[in-house]
Image (cartoon, rainbow, N blue to C red):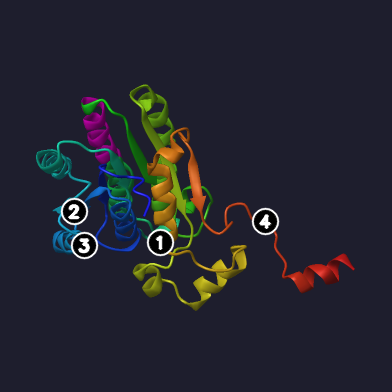
Amino acid sequence: MTRRLDGKVALVTGGARGIGYATAQAFAREWARVVIADLNVAGAQDAAASLGEQAMGLGVDVADPASVTAMIEAIIARFGRIDILFNNAGIGANTPFLETRLEDWNRILGVNLTGAFMVAQGCAREMVRVGEGGKIVNIASLSGQRGANGRAAYGSAKAGLELLTKVMAVELAPYRINVNNLAPGAIETDIAKVMHDEATRAAYGRLIPMTRYGTPEEIADAAVFLCSDEARYVHGHTLNVDGGFREAGLMFKPDAAMQRAG
């Protein structure tokens, strides 16, 4: 146990399950005081209770400015500060471009981009107020980096978040606030277990050099690094945790490659 986040107050949005909860657990193991915020209030409170007395569970709708403000006020009332933001809350969809309705487009951008902006802005203002710097990690996605079927709204929101992160990194650097992205690839979450059929899994298996899904814990480990002092000079960066998916080109199995070389 390294205590890399000892004494820090860390907010994890969308923390009731999946990547968010795994990250909250990892932060707590590093001795952070963790706030789990989620649209699922009972889930957030149960998740926080599992981490001990130093954790706090809150309800939040990141697409609602009043809800975001109330969340931040509750954190300040309890802990007096926010040192780390893991900006993870989001919703997904897999709808063809020609079938994407405007209301669905607005809802996805409202949560995944506008919501992330409002939470980050509110937390950054508190970090500036306290004057001791901070860490912000936004959750981007491969879908914001590469074209994919059904990702018109979701991919656009995540691409926007990558650019927003760069702007935040430039403007918040004078306040010693590090801002970075994490871009997960295919991760074995509860949602993936339900939504990804055999054809989807086979497609990912062909495209990922490591030939497997990642785990929420592997994303959490990367988040701990970016939020620790070890990453103090990592700034404005997008760290892909995707088994090599983004960087891979044409791939053959070793035996096929040998035959072609011969």
Secondary structure mainly formed by the magenta segment? helix
Residue 153 lies, with reference to residue 85, above or below; the image says below
CB-based contact (under 8 Å), mark 3 and mark 4: no
Query: Would you name the residue on which mark 1 appears?
Result: 217
- For marks 3 and 4 on the same chain, the one whose residue lies earlier in the sequence: 3
Which quadrant holds the N terminus?
Answer: bottom left
Residue in view at x 44 percent, y 33 percent: 166
Q: Which residues are magenta?
A: 117-129
Q: Secondary structure at mark 1?
A: helix
CB-based contact (under 8 Å), mark 1 and mark 4: no
- The local crowd at label 1, few if under 14, some if 14 to 19, many if 20 or more residues have their Cα within 10 Å, is some
- For marks 3 and 1 on the same chain, the one whose residue lies earlier in the sequence: 3
Query: Would you name the residue on which mark 4 appears?
Result: 249
Q: Nearer the viewer, mark 3 or mark 4?
A: 3
Residue in view at x 25 percent, y 40 percent: 119
Query: Would you name the residue on which mark 2 appears?
Result: 55
Return the x and y of residue 63 as percentages of the image width and height: 22, 46
Residue in view at x 39 percent, y 52 percent: 154
**Marks 4 and 2, how far apart in space?**
43 Å
Query: Would you name the residue on which mark 3 appears?
Result: 47
Q: Nearer the viewer, mark 1 or mark 4?
A: 1
- The local crowd at label 2, few if under 14, some if 14 to 19, many if 20 or more residues have their Cα within 10 Å, is many
From the viewer's perspective, tell me whether residue 180 is left or right of residue 74: right
CB-based contact (under 8 Å), mark 2 and mark 3: no
- For marks 2 and 3 on the same chain, the one whose residue lies earlier in the sequence: 3
Q: Secondary structure at mark 4?
A: loop
